[in-house]
Image: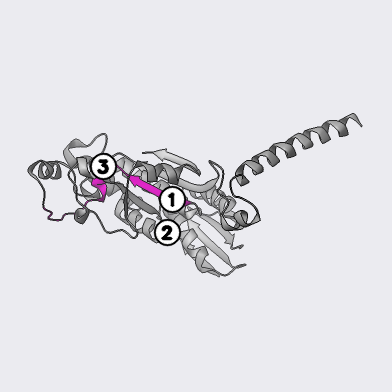
């Protein structure tokens, strides 16, 4: 399972790091991202909408958020 | 039946409009050969590009510009930045360059690069930028220098207005190194920005 820990990082880093990580993945792979930036949930949803990758799910954890993104094309 | 006719009429009208638009775009491309040869130019406002004019030379505005640029690049957009007037200061580095007296005066008066930029408000004689940088570091916000590096990695295009450089006495050897750094005028900006979806002035 590939993970990206973007906790402690603020906009635009969580999205920028996600973009970089997803580029390295194979199609169909999942990336689990941890972030505590309040903007992260709306941003990752918008990012997936724009780039066409799949947002598998998001969760609010204790003090941070978790999102799973699957690489499409 | 009436509903069907109404919907059909609406569909027909929509199709005719789209056809007219397409015809317009293909006009001038010639026959089949023309279509294959030319990449169909996207209609105005359709290219997935963000074009930014960076006119300001204050740290806060540069931060905003680079957040926009790197964010857009991370979303898969093409990004072009055009630095002009006070924005050109942000792309300076400390370098000895031959200049005339007036040019040298401008050189002293203008900040030498991102690290020396004032805030547009609450500058407090230089205290403002220091505070902002401290808080940015604490909150995990990338510094402008880091964002410039990210921009370079993500293929953000950076262009510098030569007219501004001439006015402010800046020379090419004193500008930062950036992959593909280009010098240009207003026409390049307009040509680049015209088909793009988002164009902004910072």
Q: Which residue is mark 2?
A: B154
Q: Chain of mark 1?
A: B
Q: What residue sits 46% from the left and 46% below the top?
A: B50
**Mark 1 to mark 3: distance in Å?**
22 Å
From the top left corner, tell me how far across and down residue A34 is, in percent.
49, 59
From the top left corner, tell me how far across and down residue B195 is, in percent.
50, 44
Give the mark nearest the N terminus, 3 or 2.
Answer: 2
Q: Chain of mark 3?
A: B
Q: Which residue is mark 3?
A: B163
The answer to whether mark 3 and mark 2 are in CB contact below 8 A is: no
Q: Which residues are magenta?
A: B78-98
Q: Quadrant of the N terminus of chain B?
A: top right
- What element does badge 1 sit on? strand
Judge whether B6 appears above or below A16 on screen.
above
Is residue B151 among the parts visible in the rendering?
Answer: yes
The answer to whether mark 2 and mark 1 are in CB contact below 8 A is: yes
**Residue B140 located left or right of residue B47:** left
Q: Which residue is mark 1?
A: B79
- What element does badge 3 sit on? helix
């Amino acid at each position: 399972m590939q993970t990206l820990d973007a906790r402690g990082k603020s906009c635009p880093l969580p999205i920028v790091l996600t973009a970089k990580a997803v580029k390295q993945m194979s199609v169909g792979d999942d990336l689990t991202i941890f972030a505590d930036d309040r903007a992260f949930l709306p941003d990752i949803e918008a990012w997936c909408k724009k780039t066409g990758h799949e947002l598998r799910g998001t969760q609010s954890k204790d003090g941070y958020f978790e999102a799973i993104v699957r690489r499409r094309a | 039946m009436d509903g069907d006719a109404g919907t059909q009429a609406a569909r027909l009208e929509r199709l005719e409009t789209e056809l007219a638009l397409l015809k317009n775009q293909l006009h001038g491309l010639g026959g089949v050969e023309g279509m294959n040869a030319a990449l169909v130019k996207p209609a105005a406002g359709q290219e997935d590009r963000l074009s930014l004019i960076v006119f300001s030379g204050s740290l806060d505005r540069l931060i905003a510009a680079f957040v926009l640029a790197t964010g857009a690049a991370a979303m898969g957009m093409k990004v072009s930045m055009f630095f002009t007037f006070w924005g050109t200061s942000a792309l300076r580095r400390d370098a000895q360059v031959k200049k005339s007296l007036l040019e040298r005066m401008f050189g002293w008066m203008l900040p030498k690069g991102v690290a020396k930029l004032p805030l547009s408000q609450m500058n407090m004689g230089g205290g403002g930028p220091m505070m902002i940088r401290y808080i940015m570091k604490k909150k995990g916000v990338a510094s402008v220098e880091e964002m410039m590096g990210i921009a370079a990695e993500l293929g953000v295009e950076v262009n510098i207005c030569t007219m501004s450089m001439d006015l402010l006495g800046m020379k090419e050897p004193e500008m930062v190194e950036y992959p593909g750094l280009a010098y240009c005028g207003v026409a390049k900006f307009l040509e680049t920005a015209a088909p793009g979806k988002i164009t902004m002035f910072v």
